[in-house]
Image: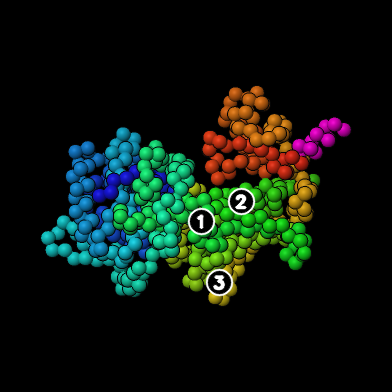
Amino acid sequence: MNMSKLPINLTDLLRQRTVEGERIEYKTGWNPDAIIRTLCAYANDFENLGGGYVVIGQDCDANGQPVFPPAGLPDNQLDKIQRELLAYCQLIQPPYFPLLSVEEFEGHKLLVLWAPGGQNRPYKAPEAVTAKKKTWHYYIRRYSSTVEAKGDTEQELLSLAAKVPFDDRFNQSARIDDLSKPLMQAFLQEVGSALAADASGLSVEALARQINLVGGPTESPWPKNVGLLFFNDTPERFFPGVQIDVVWFPEGAGGDRFEEKIFKGPLARMTREALNYIQRNYLRETVIKHPDRAEATRVWNFPYAAIEEALANAVYHRSYEEREPIEVRISNEDLVILSFPGPDRSIRLADFQAGRAVSRRYRNRRIGEFLKELDLTEGRSTGIPKILKVMTANGSPSPLFETDDDRLSFVIRLPNHPRTRAAISTTDQVTDQVTDQVTGEVMRLLVAAAQGEHTRSALQDALGLKHTPHFRKAYLLPTLEGGLIEMTRPDKPNSRSQRYRLTALGQRRLETHSSTSAS
């Protein structure tokens, strides 16, 4: 049995912060028959969700929610359970072995089995591993239950033989050294994995195997595509077209002028940098005052949460076998995100518009898993409803979802709020009213950050502030959210080498304030 440490934080796992409940099964004690059936179901990964976890020693209530503190397992049972588990996993056909981790939570020992989707599905397991006469069946997950695959479901599972999603396949044109150990370590630190503490002492291959980024025998290991997409500085070498093009049309899509910015690099960094760039340069808040009441209404030309969800959706669901980039086209009329190919044919376009679109099977099970752990997407078909909800809350026109008959492409079109269309008439001029609402705290920070790049502590000292939480809440976060300052390393917000600097918008706001004060 492969002993490992979890690639995600145990607290987040148990409290279901990064993994959906249907991908976790809790067992108060060692129940080999049920556990082997569940491992078989996770290995089959019928919905391409990325497998799942079995937590042994954790009891749950009638609704399937974990109960704290956990029951735990006695120390004298741990070795016995692991020996039996090793023997019973060999009964799965073909043999399948999850990664096992002994964890301690609230003073109790737990066994956590991480069961990624298998490379050799379909898998079948004995109905009862402890029975003398065994009968084998195929098992899959249905919501939060493990069930036998029967009839049409069994035939569909059999049709998935050797159809491993592209992101989970071995890449035989790459080497283990193409995986970046610093990027893997940074990921583990960001998600709070206990594995981060041991990562420095592991080889690249050993660390990558712990995160399931490498497969194949020891003598001939191969990196998986998902590893190269997230943990290689130049994934476009292996997957041409892995980039995000942000294009601004000051005269509209039919005009002669446009400005283009191209983002490349590991998927998480590329996505965050593109989002930060859009937020800094093209998002404007407008304050609308009303004669009949004191409270003003604040609206955005494009709400950031909708853009974040739409772009993360494109990164999650695009095909990395196609050589077409994701394109974000921005004008005074709308913000359009184009990706290839389109949604699965089982999803009707009318369901998108109504917020009822549910994918039958996910194209990139591992990419979605990493994006969810990094809080870049929620997964499970919640993206479209969230976009609709955010646009409605902002008072924006309804978004449009477009595809062609052959589902070759997918377009998410976010219309500009009608009260803010003049706000981005040029990237060199700020006409929105939000700049008049900058607080005194924010202005003091802009003055302190006027020259060069600064650490958080240096800015805090310059303002004479000793309470770090107050500095973050009242000074730092408002300027970051308003696009007035930016991080030098937005992909690693907690990096020790993080610095902060004025954006072009922040510089203009500072100059406007200085000229106003002088007059």
- For marks 3 and 1, give the CA distance: 23 Å
Q: Secondary structure at mark 3?
A: loop
Say if mark 1 contacts mark 2, CB within 8 Å.
no
Colour option used:
rainbow
Is 379 in front, or is 143?
379
Check disc 2 and give the amino acid type.
Answer: Leu
Residue tagged by mark 3? 408
Q: Is residue 246 above or below residue 324?
A: above
Residue tagged by mark 1? 235
Q: Residues within 10 Å of mark 1 (few under 14, many from 20)?
A: many
- Would you say 318 lies left or right of 426 here? left
Say if mark 2 contacts mark 3, CB within 8 Å.
no
Check disc 3 and give the amino acid type.
Answer: Leu
Give the farthest residue toward the bottom. Answer: 405
**Residue shown at 62% from the left, 48% from the top:** 276
Q: Is residue 332 magenta?
A: no
**Residue shown at 77% from the left, 64% from the top:** 256
- For marks 1 and 2, give the CA distance: 19 Å
Residue tagged by mark 2? 275
Residue 434 location, x and y as percent? 74, 43
Residue 512 location, x and y as percent? 80, 38
Q: Residues within 10 Å of mark 3 (few under 14, many from 20)?
A: few
Task: Please tell me which of labels 3 and 1 falls first in the chain.
Answer: 1
